[in-house]
Image (spheres, helix red, strand yellow):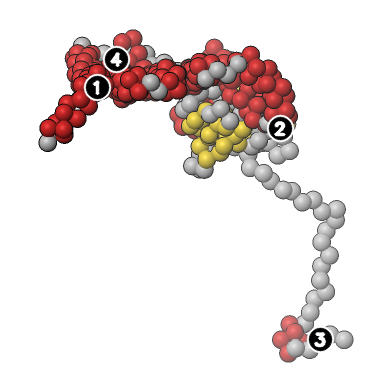
C-alpha cells in the first residue's frame, strides 16, 4: 500500500507541470468560449438597440469562427503541455504550422460569413440610412469578387505555411493555364461574359430583357458566373450562357423612354373629299392628348393610297413605359380617332373584293317545266 501511494505521488510530481498545463489550456478554451459568447452577444444587442442591424448580424455570425479559433489555441497549448515534457520533437515542430493553418482557415471562414451577411443586410441598411436601395447586381458582384479574393489570399498564405513555393505554383499555373484554356474555352468565355455584365450593367436582376438572335425573352432572376437565369412570361426558365452577351444584341425594354404607337387609319375612297379635314382633326387631337409625350414627336399624315383605302399614318409615344398602361392609352386613342372619322361623316374602310365581267353572263336554254317535272330530258 505504501508502495502504491509512493508511486502515485511520484507520478503526479513528475507530471505536475503537464497536468497543470492541460488544465490551464482547457480552462482557457472554456473561459474563452463563454467570454466571447457573452461579449459578442452584448455587442449584438447593443447594435440592435441603436439601429445597427447589419452590425448586429455580423457579431452574431462571428461567434462560431471565434469559438473555433479559441479552441484551436486551447488545443495547441494542450499539445505543447503534453509534448514538451515527453520531448516529442516531431510534434513540437509541426504544431506551430498546424496552428497557423487552422487560424488562417478560421479567418477565411469568418470573412466569408461576414460577406454573406453583407450581401443580405447591406441593401436594407442603405435603404434605412439613405432612403435608397443599392443595385442588387452590384452588391452581388462585389460579394462574388470579395469571396474570390479571400479564398485566393488565404489559400496562398496556407500554401506558404506548408512550404510550397508560390513562384513555382504561379509558373506551373501559367503553363497549365494554356492547356486548361483550350479545354475550357466555353467556361472562360462565360466568366468574361459575366464580368462584362457586372461592369457594363446592360440589365440587372428584376428587369426583363429580349435576346432577338436567340428568340429568348424573360425576367432576369439570377446572374451567375456561368449562366444567367431568365424566367419567361410563360413561367418557363431559360439558362443563358454568359458568353452570348459578348456577341449578341440585348434589348432592355424597361429602360426605354416611352412606348411607341405606330398604326394606320383606313378611310374609304368614297370619303376622299373629307380626308384633309379628318387628317387635320386627328393631328390636333394627338398633339393635345394628355397621355402622349410631345417631346419625342408626334406625326399624323395622309400616308398613301392603299389597295382598298386612304391610309392616315399615326406615329407617337406614350408618357408611360408600362406595357399595360401604354396599351390602354393606345386603345383610348384609336377609339377617339375612330369617332373623329365618324363625326366628319366618313367611315372606316373594310377590305373589298370587286369582280368585273367582260360581257353579259350566258343564259341557259329554257326547259319545259312539265318535261322537267316528268323527268323527261329534251332530245
Q: Which quarter of the rendering shows the N terminus? A: top left
State the SS at label 1: helix
Toward the right, the furthest residue is 379
* Residue at the spot 71% in from the left edge and 32% down from the top edge: 183
In the rendered structure, which disc, 4 or 1, sits on the residue that comes first in sequence? 1
The one nearer the camera, 335 or 193, is 193
Q: How many marks?
A: 4
Disc 1 target residue: 14
Q: Nearer the viewer, mark 4 or mark 1?
A: 1
In the rendered structure, which disc, 1 or 3, sits on the residue that comes first in sequence? 1
Horizontal arrangement in the rendering, residue 341 relative to residue 98 (left or right): right
Disc 2 target residue: 183
The one nearer the camera, 281 or 377, is 281
In the rendered structure, which disc, 2 or 3, sits on the residue that comes first in sequence? 2
Toward the left, the furthest residue is 1
Residue 91's x, y, as percent? 42, 23
Label 4 packing within 10 angstroms: few (<14), some (14-19), many (20+)? many
In the rendered structure, which disc, 1 or 2, sits on the residue that comes first in sequence? 1
User: Height in image: 216 above or below 98?
Assistant: below
State the SS at label 3: loop
Disc 3 target residue: 377
Q: Nearer the viewer, mark 4 or mark 3?
A: 4
Contact between labelled residues 3 and 1, with CB atoms less than 8 Å apart: no
Q: CA distance from mark 2 to mark 4?
A: 44 Å
* Residue at the spot 77% in from the left edge and 82% down from the top edge: 368
Residue 209's x, y, as percent? 56, 29
Contact between labelled residues 3 and 4, with CB atoms less than 8 Å apart: no
Amino acid at each position: 500500500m505504501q508502495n502504491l501511494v509512493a508511486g502515485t505521488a511520484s507520478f503526479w510530481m513528475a507530471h505536475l507541470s503537464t497536468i497543470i498545463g492541460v488544465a490551464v489550456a482547457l480552462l482557457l478554451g472554456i473561459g474563452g468560449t463563454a467570454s466571447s459568447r457573452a461579449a459578442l452577444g452584448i455587442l449584438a444587442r447593443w447594435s440592435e438597440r441603436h439601429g445597427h442591424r447589419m452590425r448586429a448580424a455580423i457579431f452574431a455570425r462571428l461567434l462560431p469562427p471565434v469559438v473555433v479559433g479559441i479552441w484551436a489555441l486551447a488545443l495547441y497549448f494542450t499539445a505543447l503541455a503534453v509534448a514538451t515534457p515527453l520531448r516529442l520533437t516531431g510534434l513540437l515542430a509541426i504544431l506551430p504550422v498546424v496552428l497557423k493553418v487552422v487560424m488562417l482557415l478560421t479567418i477565411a471562414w469568418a470573412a466569408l460569413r461576414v460577406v454573406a451577411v453583407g450581401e443580405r443586410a447591406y441593401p436594407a441598411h442603405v435603404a434605412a440610412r439613405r432612403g435608397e436601395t443599392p443595385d442588387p447586381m452590384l452588391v452581388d458582384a462585389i460579394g462574388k469578387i470579395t469571396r474570390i479574393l479571400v479564398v485566393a489570399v488565404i489559400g496562398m498564405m496556407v500554401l506558404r505555411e506548408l512550404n510550397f513555393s508560390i513562384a513555382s505554383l504561379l509558373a506551373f499555373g501559367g503553363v497549365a493555364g494554356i492547356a486548361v484554356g483550350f479545354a475550357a474555352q466555353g467556361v472562360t468565355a462565360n466568366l468574361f461574359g459575366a464580368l462584362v455584365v457586372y461592369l457594363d450593367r446592360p440589365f440587372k436582376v428584376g428587369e426583363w430583357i429580349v435576346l432577338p438572335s436567340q428568340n429568348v425573352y424573360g425576367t432576369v432572376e439570377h446572374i451567375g458566373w456561368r449562366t444567367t437565369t431568365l424566367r419567361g412570361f410563360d413561367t418557363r426558365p431559360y439558362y443563358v450562357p454568359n458568353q452570348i452577351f459578348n456577341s449578341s444584341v440585348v434589348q432592355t425594354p424597361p429602360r426605354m423612354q416611352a412606348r411607341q404607337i405606330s398604326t394606320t387609319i383606313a378611310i374609304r375612297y368614297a370619303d376622299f373629299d373629307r380626308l384633309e379635314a379628318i387628317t387635320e382633326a386627328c393631328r390636333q387631337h394627338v398633339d393635345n392628348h394628355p397621355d402622349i409625350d410631345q417631346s419625342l414627336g408626334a406625326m399624323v399624315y395622309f400616308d398613301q393610297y392603299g389597295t382598298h383605302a386612304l391610309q392616315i399614318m399615326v406615329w407617337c409615344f406614350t408618357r408611360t413605359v408600362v406595357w399595360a398602361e401604354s396599351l390602354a392609352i393606345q386603345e383610348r386613342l384609336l377609339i377617339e380617332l375612330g369617332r373623329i372619322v365618324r363625326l366628319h361623316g366618313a367611315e372606316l374602310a373594310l377590305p373589298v373584293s370587286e369582280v368585273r365581267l367582260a360581257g353579259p353572263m350566258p343564259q341557259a336554254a329554257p326547259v319545259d317545266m312539265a318535261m322537267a317535272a316528268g323527268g323527261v330530258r329534251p332530245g
